[in-house]
Amino acid sequence: MDEMKVLGIETSCDETAAAVVEIDKSLNCSLLSNVVATSMDLHAKYGGVVPEIAARSHIESIIPVIDEATQPVGWDNIDAIAVTKGAGLGGSLLIGVMTARTLSIAKDKPLYGVNHVEGHIYANFLTTHSTPYDYQLASKAPVFPILGLIVSGGHSQLVLFRDHFDYTLLGRTQDDAVGEAFDKVAKIIGLPYPGGPSVGKKALDGNAQAFDLPKAKMANKYDFSFSGLKTAVLRQAQAIIGQDYTFPSKDLPDRLSEAQKADIAAVFQRVAIETVVDKTILAYEEFRPTSVVIGGGVAASPELRRQLAERLPIEITYQDPRLMTDNGAMIATLGAFKAQLGQPTDNAYTLEPQPNLSM
Ligand code: KG4
Ligand code: ZN
């Protein structure tokens, strides 16, 4: 087809999001609308996403969010619907998938159930927009082979894309995601959720060499593990105040000085980010990709950007931050490529969420 417009729907975690993307026959992608409603504030007091609260927020937000995203385009001009089918929280995914199935049937549009993590990479293919907002988009699309690093609150993965829909998962986390580790460490030292920005800010006042923390050794060199690092932080915090492992973690924030918290934040951040960057460099050297692209909330980390700029031989183009965290545009873009390149559609009567979907 000449041009296609695709609606993308994303509800895998705590963002209810919808967007419309247009793809032309040369595969240039343009963002026509992008709407995100987040329930992050509701989770903040629990220090992490509460699945039941997230699911209830999706129910409340999904119709208004889709209405707002489709309004500038008009349903008659939409050629297909893409929805995140996994990975993610079961109850949250269900709302998006059921809404997309219903719309696909009611509006008679083809349906594509897509992989959330793959979507994070596709957000990098958006190079123009016609929204009223000041998006700073990548100036050109990435070029295959592409090394993709996905670092968020739910995912830590390295993926090698040879071409569209032809990729290999090089490695993934065996336990916590890197963003999740930031969130848990923030909780240990009494900083607010989400932990990435609060730990990053605190780290500015600390000494990143104050002590050291262990890096996990993995059987597959591209796999990640962050739960040991989180435990090492907890033990270090207990030791700093002269206590052993029985000291309750909830009492740590009151006992640590601001300077001690800053050192813990700085050392943890250095080691967590080094772990991600070490593996990215290793994969770069083995596969020599033309482009390296990043997706997920941790991509906002100035420490990650600093270390990558220092160690990676090629320059990384960072997409607009609003397209790196969870959004509908990344799902719409992946759906647009599927539609334009003739990938098979999904059955609107049977598509099911796949919470544990892997790449
Ligand atoms: O992509 P995202 O918005 O949602 C998920 O799919 O998880 O990522 C959220 C994660 C949180 O764990 C948050 O702590 C982390 O991204 N994050 C950061 C920064 N900003 C957000 N981590 C490190 N440094 C940051 N500046
Ligand atoms: Zn995500």
Image (cartoon, rainbow, N blue to C red):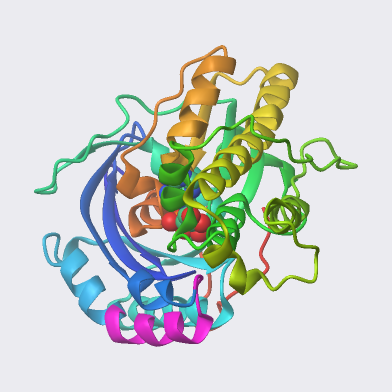
**Quadrant for the N terminus in the image:** top left
Picture quadrant where residue 207 is located? top right
x 16%, y 69%: residue: 68
Question: Of helix, strand and loop, which mostly describes the magenta segment?
Answer: helix
Instruction: Left or right? Give the position of 241 relative to 43.
Output: right
Q: Is residue 245 visible?
A: yes
x 37%, y 76%: residue: 104
> Which residue occupies the foreground of this view, 81 or 2?
81
Give the farthest residue toward the front: 242
Q: In this rendering, is residue 296 above or below 74?
A: above
Q: Is residue 8 shown in magenta? A: no
> Which residue occupies the foreground of this view, 119 or 270?
270
Give the farthest residue toward the top: 313
Q: Position of residue 272 (x, y in %)?
A: 64, 41
Q: Position of residue 340 (x, y in %)?
A: 41, 46
> Which residue occupies the foreground of this view, 84 or 274?
274
> Magenta residues, as a range?
47-61
x 24%, y 46%: residue: 31
x 24%, y 72%: residue: 65
Q: In this rendering, is residue 349 above or below 84?
A: below
Q: In this rendering, is residue 337 above or below 49?
A: above
Instruction: Left or right? Give the position of 15 relative to 313.
Output: left
Instruction: Left or right? Give the position of 293 relative to 286.
Output: left
Q: In this rendering, is residue 320 above or below 34?
A: above
Number of marks: 0
Q: Is residue 165 visible?
A: no
Q: Position of residue 173 (x, y in %)?
A: 72, 51
Picture quadrant where residue 237 is located? bottom right
Q: Is residue 48 shown in magenta? A: yes
Q: Position of residue 3 (x, y in %)?
A: 26, 44
> Which residue occupies the foreground of this view, 252 or 163?
252
